[in-house]
Amino acid sequence: MSDKIAYSRHGDIAVLTVQNPPVNALSQAVRQGLWDGMDRAEADDGVKAVLIVGEGRAFFAGADITEFGKPPMEPYLPVLINRIEASPLLVVASMHGVSLGGGLEVALGCHYRIAVPSARVGLPEVHLGLIPGAGGTQRMPRLTGVEAALDVMTTGRQIKADEAAKLGLIDEVRDGDPKQNGIDYTQSLLDAGAPRRPVSEMETPAAIDWDGAFETILSRGRGQISPAWCVRAVQAGVEKPFAEGLAAERKIFMDLMETDQRQGMIHAFFSERAVGNLPELKGVEPRALQHIGVIGGGTMGAGIATSALLSGFQVTLLEMTPEAGEAARKRIAGNLSGALKRGKISQDKHDAILNNILSVVTNYEALSDVDLVIEAVFEEMSVKKTVFAELDRVCKKGAILASNTSYLDVNEIAASTSRPEDVIGLHFFSPAHVMKLLEIVVADKTAPDVVATGFELGKRMSKISVRAGVCDGFIGNRILSTYRTAADHMILDGASPYEIDKALEAFGFAMGPFAVADLAGLDIGWAVRKRKRAEGIDPAARDSSYADKLCEDGHFGQKTGKGYYDYSAGAKARVPNPDVMPLIEAERAQQGISPREFTAEEIVRRYMAAMVNESAKVVGEGIARRPLDVDMTLLFGYGFPRYRGGPLKWADIVGLPELLADMQEYRKEDPHFWQIAPLLEQLVAEGKTFDDLNKAAAA
Ligand code: 3HC
Ligand code: NAI
């Protein structure tokens, strides 16, 4: 037997204990061990029942994802589960921690299921670009009915034990040690003469409108296909005998395994775990964090304070005046009442936070005791420097001084204090209590334990933290500026903002760039353009002023009711603002440009080429450590479709030589904008991919 499964006897019960840390993934050795364990139990004199239980954190976290993309190895999971279900012995699963994907499918192959109250189950395969591939689409609907099963598998959500019991997935929920619980429960089944109860032999559930469900789920997926394919697998299970349904499920699973979407999503799964794994932080202890200061309680400050409060920190927020402080408190209270409504906090917790844990002040002395302070005042260097001088004066020794600046030079801010080693950028995204991304901007003199504390803060706030170096816009906003410029160039040359948004939303972005600009506020981009013009624009760069005219007329996007779109019928019912195209046409005429047609395909290719090129520069210059850092930044901060893995994973899949050839073509028209990243040229010359760089960094 494999060392992954321990075999023990408890009276008439054989116990198979899974030992594959950290999460009992169903690797080949585990599958083989379970198979051998079943053989041994069936041959073991006097054994009447088998109990399967996991050791450590989980029952099973599912199939071993590291085996995906490699040739499948026997015993295959669906075959093993059929073999468990077909055993003449009574087979029971005792679940704790998570039972996900193939893990839940193993439990569904058992005849009875018991779980501790804290157990969670689910079929999250859609998050990996797959469907359940070991009988989940066939067995679950027989227990729960089709609608509940489709909800579970198309959302991939984790269900708590009590809900799973109500759905019919778990027979008994009982507190205690999973192994002892399982033995007691199995013994009680044997004592009661309970029969074997294979789910595959249960009645098939009622049919639904399969085509309608397929279309609805497909349209919800913004281009992601696997959730909709769950419908076809369940349909096969309802319409055909069990074995044929299972074969149909397997075929869909194997077909999806070959897709780019599966590659993209698995890249995202591993990258979001690898992103905080930096060699320079190994063994570096973060500083203690309990009390957080926030300067400025506007959009960002209030969101950051909310996120800190919800993560269990004490927060002191400083505003300029009592009135501004009151407005900040109201913003935070609004955010917290949203958390209360969504069941994220209790009423007591909500009241305690507002009455005792949050303080709003106007004097810097109140910050003398904070462990870390995050400045979120106006985006102006002179204002930031004044704030940091005050913080330098009042904050205790060892306190971390952070800025939420979007673009400004963190080295310059750090140099304005007497303790540059304690200064760091912590760049949150709006709304800060919702968005997952946190860029941790490491300045030249930032101490390693300050960086480690930034990552610790991100972890405690449940953020995806990405290390970034100092440059204009760091990783995300720098790349955004470039692909936005590519979009602006396409507008000058003949595309409309609406064609561009439509093409990119069809590509899978949550929103197109012009809808995003309206949401963020057009005044932000306007301020950046004004600053850059003041710094001096290269005369060779293409420029345009139609967007400034929109701002000059007071149209800042959603917050003023008009921007590229008109929102008078509500934020969702966006319609093109009729004032926009005349401004663009006037600009084209003034620049002597005859507009041409752009297909959706060309829009996507140019936009993505610009994104990939700037991303390659960001990696090449060391602003991002690895390609995966860029991918995670775009995924968690900029609405990049997860199923495409990120811009550099997308680039690998499309092919770097093809992308480089596109860029060389575009360069002929505009050599100033299309300056090709040396790293991209080097990878193509060496026949390598961005993922090769990720692998080299992990080695
Ligand atoms: N296979 C291989 N490795 C896995 C794994 C899996 N299914 N699940 C988790 N791991 C690894 C992680 O990569 C991580 O490795 P690292 O320490 O080297 O970074 C380690 O286990 C711990 O994982 P987390 O850091 O994510 O730990 P958490 O406690 O935060 O979360 C979890 C645990 C809820 C199990 C989470 O890891 C998770 O959601 N895993 C994926 C579950 C899943 O998608 N299962 C379905 C697989 S597909 C399938 O079963 C197909 C079948 O239908 C045929
Ligand atoms: P905002 O204008 O909504 O809020 C700024 C707040 O700071 C105001 O409430 C103002 O009263 C306060 N303030 C200004 N000077 C102050 C001072 N000297 N002392 C105390 N309080 C002061 O601005 P927003 O959008 O919250 O931006 C703040 C910072 O966050 C900027 O640096 C911005 O670049 C950055 N940021 C903004 C994002 C966004 O989407 N809005 C996203 C990420 C970063």
Image (spheres, grey):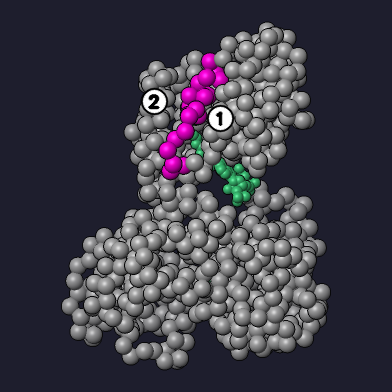
Of the 4 image quadrants, the one containing the N terminus is top right
User: Mark number for residue 121?
Assistant: none
Is residue 1 at least partly visible in the picture? yes
Q: Is residue 98 magenta?
A: no
Closest to the observer, 661 or 490: 661
- Magenta span covers which residues? 68-86
Q: Which residue is drawn at the image coordinates 72% and 22% (left, top)?
A: 8
Relative height, residue 270 to residue 88 (above, below): below
The amino acid at mark 2 is Ala
**Vertically, is 294 above or below 278?**
below
Which quadrant would residue 169 be assigned to in this image?
top right
* Residue wearing tag 2: 247
The residue positioned 73% from the left and 56% from the top of the image is 350
Q: Secondary structure at mark 2?
A: helix
Residue 683's image quarter?
bottom left
Q: Amino acid at mark 1?
A: Arg
Quadrant containing ligand 1 reads top right
Q: CA distance from mark 2 to mark 1?
A: 20 Å
Q: Is residue 68 left or right of residue 365?
A: left
Compare residues 576 and 529 and report the one nearer the observer. Answer: 529
Mark 2 vs mark 1: give the one in front. 1
Residue 681 falls left or right of residue 88: left
**Image disc number at residue 31:** 1
Q: Secondary structure at mark 1?
A: helix
Q: Kindly identify the residue that appears in the image at 19 percent across and 74 percent down.
A: 595
